[in-house]
Amino acid sequence: MARLMSQDGKKIMGTIVGDEFIKYVLGSKHQLRIPSAWAMDKWVFNTIKYEGVRVVRIIDKESGKEYTAELKMFDRHGFKVDRGHGEQIALQLRWWVVLNTTRDEHHVVLEGRVKVLERQIESSVDGFMKLSEENTQLRKDLEEANGLIIMLQVREQDCLRQLEEIDDIPVMMEGYSNG
């Protein structure tokens, strides 16, 4: 979980949790009226895109509504706006999925998401441990294979020496001379 602070470091712009950017707002103050849309600072958009965020979730603290949109929707349907707060990227409400929740329901939803993330982390750790065990076994197998290669190289050298010794022994056969 990482908080994204304003450029002057005074305000929390939102929080990155996994592949989601979550922002709490006051709808009466922050929602665009014409056209009805949610907007974010352009640098926030670029930052969360760089960080690998796939989903934007805006939670209106007044109404309890939760607005969710995939970040790619901003690329496809977003528009630039500057109404005195710097350049922003906005997405009309028709591109958002809206959930009506009470504050208590919202906490239950968040707790559920936390549990899902915890399971994903556990699964990732288990997968890492399994890969680590497999890596250890592969190292052992590689060491054994290297030992076998060295042993075969020594045997090859022994065989070559024996062949040289055989060439040095005079063979007396009728009509044949090896030297």
Image (spheres, rainbow, N blue to C red):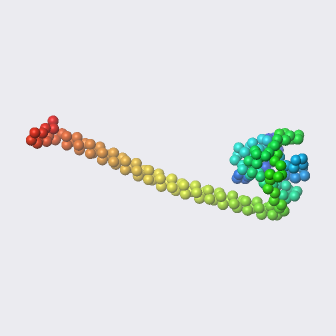
The residue depicted at 22 percent of the width and 40 percent of the height is 164
The quadrant holding residue 60 is bottom right
Q: Is residue 163 above or below residue 113?
A: above
Nearest the camera: 61 or 77? Answer: 77
Q: Which residue, as the protein is rendered here, is positioned at the far top?
A: 179
Residue 104 shows in the view = yes
**x, y percentage for residue 88?**
82, 42
Of 169 and 94, nearer the camera is 94
Q: Nearer the viewer, residue 78 or 65?
A: 78
Between 70 and 104, the one nearer to me in the picture: 70
- Counting from the top left corner in percent of width and height, residue 144 is at 41, 52
Instruction: Judge left or right: residue 117 versus residue 9.
Output: left
The residue that appears at 72% across and 59% down in the rendered structure is 114
Assign the C terminus to one quadrant of the image. top left
Kindly give the residue lying farthest to the left in the view shown: 174
Q: Residue at left 48%, top 55%? A: 137
- Could you say where residue 165 lies in the image, as x and y percent from the top left? 20, 42
Q: Is residue 156 left or right of residue 48?
A: left
User: Is there any visible trace of residue 30 in the rendered image?
Assistant: no
Count of labels shown?
0
63 w.r.t. 75: above or below: below
Classify residue 158 as left or right of residue 178: right
Instruction: State the image coordinates of residue 127 (x, y, percent, origin top left).
Output: 58, 57
Q: Residue at x 10, y 39 (%)?
A: 175
Q: Is residue 6 above or below residue 106?
A: above
